[in-house]
Image (cartoon, rainbow, N blue to C red):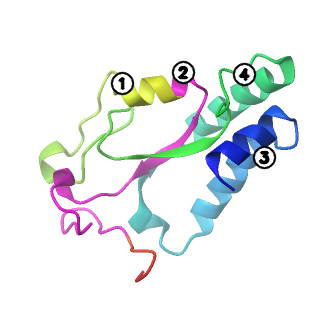
Amino acid sequence: MSAGELGRGIGEGDIDPVALTEAYLDAIETHPLADRIYARRTEATARAQAEAAALRARNGTRFGPLDGVPVSWKDLFDTAGTATEAGSALLKGRVPDHDAEVVRNAQGMGLVGLGKTHMSELAFSGLGLNPVTASPPCVNDP
């Protein structure tokens, strides 16, 4: 399903944001390449955001059409309190104290952050290779 379809399902009461988030977290946990896909996962934050989205859905106070829909952030986007290293040893251990504007806006619309995905070092290459952290798998050639 697309993000829009998930959002509509949440709005119509057919999809529970908590169950949806748990399904995504379970899929991530059991995926054989999860460690190459995710640099770090934010399960506790995701669960709290999903609970809040579910409450808003029940109360008819959703922030927008994507409220409760899970999203993953490339490790390039600052997320307050969660390491943002851009796949680089130069930024190892860097934990920003504020969110990037795109993250702040998405959270303001109620999107649920599942974690940070691996990327090419400093977003320098379109090939997706990263000898420093992990090269994310290609869906056509895992």
Q: Which numbered disc, 1 or 4, marks the residue that appears first in the sequence?
A: 4
Q: CA distance from mark 3 to mark 4?
A: 17 Å
Which residue bears the numbered disc 2? 108
**Where are the magenta residues, as a range?**
107-136
Residue type at mark 1 is: Glu
Residue 73 in view, yes or no: yes
Residue 66, given in percent of the width and then of the height, sits at 64, 34
Q: Are marks 3 and 4 in contact (CB under 8 Å)?
A: no
Which residue bears the numbered disc 3? 19
Q: Is residue 131 magenta?
A: yes
Residue 37, given in percent of the width and then of the height, sits at 43, 63
**Which mark, by number, is residue 62?**
4
Q: CA distance from mark 1 to mark 3?
A: 28 Å
State which mark lies toward you, 3 or 2: 2
Could you tell me which secondary element the residue under label 1 belongs to? helix
Which residue bears the numbered disc 1? 101
Residue 48, given in percent of the width and then of the height, sits at 65, 30
Residue 56, given in percent of the width and then of the height, sits at 76, 21
Q: Which quadrant of the figure has residue 110? A: top right
Q: Which numbered disc, 3 or 2, marks the residue that appears first in the sequence?
A: 3
State which mark lies toward you, 1 or 3: 1
**Which mark, by number, is residue 142?**
none
State which mark lies toward you, 3 or 4: 4
